[in-house]
Each structure stands twice: as structure tokens, then as C-alpha cells.
Amino acid sequence: MPKPRVIYWFRTDLRLRDSPALKAALDLNPEAFWPVWTWDPHYVYRARVGVNRWQFLIDCQNDLSKSITKINEKSKLFLMREAPQTLFPKLFKAWKITHLVFEKDTDSYGRDRDTEVIRLAREAGVGVIFRSGRTLWDSDQLVEKNHGKPTMSISQVQTAGPKVGKIPRPIPAPKFLPDPGESNLDFEQNQPEVAPDFNSGSRKHEDKSYEKISGPHEDFTVPALEELGFPAATGPHRGGETIALEMLDKIIADEKYTATFEKPNTAPTAFEPQATTLLSPHLHFGSLSIREFYWRVQDVADNYSGKASRPPVSLTGQLLFRDMYFAAQASLGYSFGQTLYNSHCRFIPWHLPSKVNHETKTVIGEYHIDSPQAEEWLLRWKYGRTGFPWIDALMRQLCQEGWIHHLGRHAVACFLTRGGCYISWERGAEVFEEWLIDHETACNAGNWQWLSCTAFYAQFYRCYSPIAFPQKWDKEGKFVRRYVPELKGLDKKYIYEPWKAPIADQKKAGVKIEGDGKVEKEGVYPMPMFDFAERRTICLDGMKKAYKVGLYGDDPKVIDGTWRELFDDDVEGPTEGKSFEDAMGREAEGDDAKLREVPVGGDKNDGAVEEDKSGAKEKGGENKGGDATKGRKRKGVQGTLDGHVKKSKKKL
DNA sequence: TCGATTGTTGGCCGC
DNA sequence: CGCGGCCAACAATCG
């Protein structure tokens, strides 16, 4: 038997402390040991990742590499710029690898990727070891103990979890790491498939991600943001296990905060400091172990002299919800991230529905514009120009800092979907995916389904008001003043509804409330994009009717488009185009597809929806999934679009 | 079987 | 200003 030569493959576990998989790797007693990260094109191009999340990832990688070197000065994180599916077979040979070890991943792409890598390892005679470690309980086992069904409520998790077993106590970081062997690369690099590149819009410089397999200096170091083509991060939140453990220490040191934490009682308007822990991005990248978090909190709660809070509202309760979403996704696969083909997601005829590839049964990253007005509302929502200060403040905080409070996420999600715009939750989920530093596919899709009342939650008549809700938390409007500085001087009477401020008050505050937000002008804040009370009524009515129809995403009627026969034409949603033949059905061709290929103008137009000289509406930038189209300006899109929609209507 | 209860986090009105 | 009850009413769970 040859002595083990082991690759430890880091993915969503960028830490040394409490890693069951890392322990399994070291238990092999390797002769040579390489800590490896594969720079996967799927993440670089196909995931939507904004600058703040890139920064966080790079922080985590640098910190981990340093920690590795601290234990063994000959070692570090070997960052390799190639897809694991093509890299590993070559690497197994070149480095005479005997074992590949990693932490289990139940994300849909993660599973596909790992299945393929395991197959390749077998072919190469390499042993594969993996361990669960990303969640409190193994997600597949949680599903199994939930009668083989996706976990759709927290009580199901609370019942099934203990059946899987006790949540393990964290294990310490290794004190010893074996040397890596010779790390020569005597093979060619496979160049990745770049298109579609969902991130082209936020690249400012040339993309050099894959110029050399071991990086520009051929030393396997972590890339800089600039190499990837991205500008500097705009937010204050930084990654890495070192920071994560310091943050946790601080939280745990405050016994009262830790033991009595109740999520619904934390203020979404709090900033500097925020009301919640900010540890979610560390859970996402694995710079903090969830079991470490769980037990440190649980021990404080158990020893607390007063009355400790309990799940679901307590800190540990938040972690249970995370496990719930992970297990739901583990059970439902790709369909969990979309409406179509999702057996547990209600079908609501939202505006701007996703385009779907019916062969793969997955969304393709583009959507139908069934309503030009909804498209305009989506962009005003995304860039914080809705005219509702509470919504705009949150969306601007999200864009700049990559994080907003959970209840703030509720507010903007409800507003975009069932409580305002009646736009598909998938559009909102895409924006969150791009901007959130703690974006977790399972949690994001799950929370959007929750808030849009399409799964997990059904009380759609409980609707967040963009005026009354923030009023409860922040009467002075400090949060709005911080993130919507145009309104800084406005009297608190009008801070959540500035359109009601008399001209004299507007003058005093140095702000004019006018226009539709398409032109960003100094000292101007837009009028609200609709009457909220009116929209709430329309949405509620639409929800009631959609619930009565009672379709789910995998219903044949939903898939073949005949669902339209079950809805009246006067119901809010794409049914207003009963005439719009392609609202949900087969792949669009021609005009519509071409229109979607507009530049992802986020870099140029962030925060503003500029006006085109022709008078047509200029869009502020969005996720199109088009290939490299940066720098191009869109002209007269709206005009063309109107034409297109009219044309479509005539077809029937 | 079915009615009552419960569900992490609403708004509004009146006291 | 804070609190309790009601609004109008979803679905899963439980006895």
C-alpha cells in the first residue's frame, strides 16, 4: 500500500476549526497533503456574484491560506484556476494522488459536480472520502427522517432533527498539517466556457480569471478582485475565519443578548451596529462552523440565570430554519430554486416570469417581459428609486453593503411580489443572489417563496406597509436619512411618505419630491411609483384568486400554459396578456430574446435610471445572462418593447 | 371527520 | 405612546 497522498478540496468550508471532513483527511495520516481550491467557472460566470461577495470570498481564502501556513510554513491554500471536472484527473496523475477528501454539498450544481468528480476519481483509482458538515444535520438524512419529504415547516425539522441524531460538538482545529508534495504542473490548462456570463455587467476591467492555472505569479495564490475584472468592494463587511471567531466571541460575551435574542424583536432599522449577528456570510462560506455557533449559543442559553428565548425566535432557531431550507432543497433539487417544475411552490401568475428550458426543466436565467410597467417597477425597486423611502433605503443599503436585516428583506420582498408590484419572486431572488454577501441558494429561494406566499407560508393578507412598518422601529427616520441622503433634512412627519410634504417643507429640507426616478437629479427624490393602498388591494385580490385556482409549479397546466384558462382576464398578472401567448410557455424566439441581450449596465447606471435622449426609457441595468456586452448603451428599449408587446397581442 | 389551534416577525383602531 | 383586540381568513396539525 502506498502512503496516502491526499488532496483536501475546500469549497463551502473555508475554515480549519470544526471540519469533520478535514479531520477525516488528516486521519489518513498522509505522506503528502494539498489543501486545494478549484476556481470553478460555474461560480465565476454562472452564479450571480457582486463585488462585495467576491471580496468576502477572497478574504476567506486569504485568511485560510495564512492559517494553514501558520501551522505548516511549507503549506498554503493551493488555488487552481480550472473546473474541477477537468482539473482533477490531470492532478491525480501529476501529483500521484491516492485520496480526495471534501465536505458534502447538497446544492444542486454541487451535487452534479461532485457526482462527476467521484466518477473521475474512481476511474483514476483515487479514493474519495466526504463528510457532512455544512448543516446541523445531514440534509439527506433530515429528509429521510421527515418521511422522505422536503422539510416545509420548522416543526418538521424539530421533529426530524433529533431522529437523525444529536448535533455533534465542534472539533478543534488541527495542530499539525503534513507537507504538500512536489507541486509541479506538467499539463495544459483547460479553458472554461465563459458564456453565459451573468457577471459581465459588473466587470470593469479585463477578466483575467483563467490566464494561468496557478495564477499570474504561478504560485497558487488567491486572485485579487482586479484580476477578475471587478472594481473594489463597496461594503464594510469582511470575511475570514479569524474575523468570524472574533465576532462570535463578542456575541457570546454578551450573555443577555445571546440568551434572550428574539428575531422578531430586532430592529431592521438599526445600523452601526446592526441588531443581528452578521454571521450569516461566515456560515455561507464556512468561515464559521454552524455547530460551533450552535453550541456556543446553546451553552450560554442553558446557563443563563434569566429566561432564555427558544426556537424558532432564538438564535439557535435561526440555524434550524437554515437546516429546513437546506433539506427542502436537498429533496427538491434544481426545482427548489424556481417556480416551474417545483412541486411545492404555488403557481401565481406573477409578472416577469422566468424563461424555462423544458428539456432540462430548469430556468435559463432570462425572463419574459409581459408588462413593460412591471419591468420599470422592477428596475426602480432594484436601484432604490421607488419613491418609498423605506424600500429605497433598504435596496441602497443592500447594493452598497451586501447585507440588510432579515425584516428589511421581508419588507422589500413583500413589496416586490404579493404586496405591491406582483412581480415573480424569482426576479427578486436574482437581485439578492447578486448583491447579498450571505447569499445561500437554499435560504434565498426558500425565503423568497416564504415572503411571496408560494411555499412555507400562506397568510398573504399579512402585508408589510412601506410606511407603517418602519414607523414601528424608527420614528425619526434615521435609517432612511442614512441611506437616502436626499431626504436627510425632511421632517420626521413625512420621512416615510415624502410626497405628502408641503412645498414649504420640501424647500426647508432642500429636496424636491417630483418625477419618476428615471433621472437622478441633485436634490430630487421621486414621487411614489404607485398608490400603495391601491396596489395592496389589487395584489390581495390576485392572491386570493390564485390560491383558489390552487396550482403548483409542476402542474401540467402550468407547464403547458393552459393555466390561463383558469384565470379571468381581469386578474392581476400575466393574464392581462391572455393575449400574451408566450408569457410562460415555450421558449421565446426572435424579438423578445434579442431584447433581453441588453447590457448589464449595473456598472454605469447603478443607482440611477438615466433618461435617453430620444425620450424612451433607459433601464438602469439588470441581470440578463447575456454574454460580454459591457459598455454598450441601450437606446429606445422601451419603445421597441412596447411595439413588441402590441405585436404579440395582435397574434391572437 | 372536523373544528379548534397554531403558525418566527402585519395593520389598524380605540382605549 | 403602548397595548389589546379585531380585521379577514391561509394551511397544517392535532385531538
Image (spheres, coloured by chain):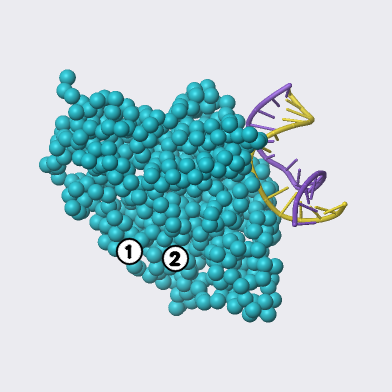
Chain colours: A cyan, B yellow, C purple
Element marked by disc 2: loop
Left/right of residue B2 with respect to residue A372 in the rendered view: right
| Residue A204: mark in rendering | 1
Q: Is residue A494 left or right of residue A116?
A: right
Q: Is residue A505 left or right of residue A270?
A: right
Residue A491: tell me if it is visible.
yes
Q: Amino acid at mark 2?
A: Asp
Instruction: Identify residue type, mark 1.
Output: Lys
Residue at the far left in the pictured view: A186
Residue at 42% across, 40% down:
A288
Which chain is mark 1 on? A
A308 w.r.t. A246: above or below: above
User: Toward the viewer: A280 or A124?
Assistant: A280
Name the one closer to the observer, A207 or A76. A76
Residue A246: give x, y in percent of width and height: 44, 45
Which residue matches tag 2? A606
Q: Chain of mark 2?
A: A
- CB under 8 Å between callouts 2 and 1? no
Give residue A230's quadrant in the image: bottom left
Please report the residue visible at 57 percent of the width from the left and 40 percent of the height from the top: A255
Above or below residue A159? Residue A231 is below
